[in-house]
Image (cartoon, grey):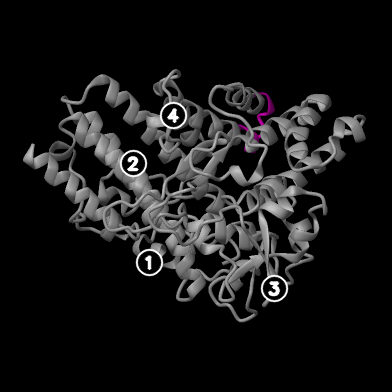
Amino acid sequence: MIRNRYGILLIVFATYFLLPSCEDFVELEPPNYKMVAQTVFEDDETVIAAVTGIYNELFSSASFANGHISSVTVLAGMSSDILETTSATDIRYGPFQQNQISPSETQDASANYELWSSAYNIVYMANAILEGSTNSVDISKETRTSVEGQVLFIRAFTYFYLVNLYGDVPLILTTDYRQNAIVPRTDASKVLERIKADLDLAIALLDPVRDYTDMERTQVNLYVALALRARVSLYEEDWQQAEEYSSTVINQETHYELQMDLNQVFLKNSREAIWQISPRPEGFIPFSYTREGYFFRGFNSSPVKLSDDFVATLHVEDKRLASWIDFNESRGFYYPQKYKDGSSRGNITEYSMVLRLAEQYLIRAEARAMQGNLSGAIADLDKIRVRAGLAPLADTNPEMGQQALLDMIMEERKQELFTEWGHRWFDLKRTGKATEVLAPLKPLWQDTDVLYPIPGEERAKNPNIIQNEGY
């Protein structure tokens, strides 16, 4: 048992201090914090501790996921038409706003590398837990099943962002550092197949009747996996599956409902939340607030703001304008206020939202519209519109045509999901509208800008990784 507890401490130490990038697992020497399955996962307690560690990492050090300066939320928001810099000379975010990201040796390149490397650290941790639980003979069947389901989801979730940001990416499925050091990029379609396979296995493993532990919505369960599976199906244009998966989540009324008060949506354990990341203090991390709440405080020194053009798309009666957006009077810019707390200590009121019910309604609305079920699509879209204080389409325009309805759904996605996990950037890309929408706003736009560059530091370590076109 002493050996096991040492393993736990080693993981915790690595989580907070030694995992800022994926550099260590592609070196030719094994990382000194390498999780060794035989010495760590010898009972239920240690493997559960390892899974807790990966959840903590998503908040503490995983830049792509934590909603802070190099997160998907911030960087992809800059790349779309949602966020802008507050300074014309900003060298970290300006290149993301103009879609002129450098592969190396600049501040924007550093942010891009943090995005990439932190995602691959999560992949590495997931692989280590999967290997450790598989190799252990002393973990109970129930714990092994739950752990593998959660970790397979987390790996799929991470690859979802990697493949949508970069296209073809190395598919790393092992902790073998020598093998990982030379893995070339894998075709995006094959990465997507692995994402679906991991999610489908997670769905099979996760208990359909298991509630959230201690009523906290911070642990992956069956409906978390189904929610992401619905999104993947939408991106693949598998409309029937997208409708089926989203419907399964929407129908879990004992778990989920739309919060009619918009100020309640992003609170911890909100009934709209499907999966959240907790900022609960762990170890040396003192935060009692989300990173999004801290980053988007709207201070005079804030590096980013909401685009005036985006704010102008919201109707004056839209409750999202009053509840989720604020205005800096002294500097004259709008900023997001979905999270209200960016400074408290010891009184956690909000968790970082990852997946929520509103997206599932929007997924199903689009899937239904694409299948010709326009009335069903309008019914779903009206759930979001009515909550926002807007007139239901069923009353104002029940005979709306398919294309007009699809355009309306895209507009509602933009207005509902802004500054959440890069939804707008990915929507423009998957619908083929990135150039149409962004070229008039960004003078240097090129079609190849839909993919971020592979970080130069990564290519320097692995010569088998080729660069994306346009860089």
Mark 1, other Cα within 10 Å: few <14 / some 14–19 / many ≥20 = few
Residue assigned mark 4:
221
**Circle 2 sits in a helix, a strand or a loop, which is it?**
helix
In the image, the segment drawn in magenta is 233-240
Q: How many angstroms separate mark 3 from mark 2 (CA)?
A: 45 Å
**Circle 4 sits in a helix, a strand or a loop, which is it?**
loop
Which mark lies nearer to you, 3 or 2?
3
Q: How many angstroms separate mark 1 from mark 3 (CA)?
A: 46 Å
Q: Which mark is residue 126?
A: 2
Q: Which mark is residue 460?
A: 1
Name the residue located 48 percent from the left edge and 69 percent from the top edge: 109
Q: Is residue 231 left or right of residue 66?
A: right
Dot placed on the residue nearer the N-terminal end, 3 or 2: 2
Residue assigned mark 3:
329
Mark 2, other Cα within 10 Å: few <14 / some 14–19 / many ≥20 = many
Residue 76: percent from the left, percent from the top? 59, 58
Dot placed on the residue nearer the N-terminal end, 1 or 3: 3
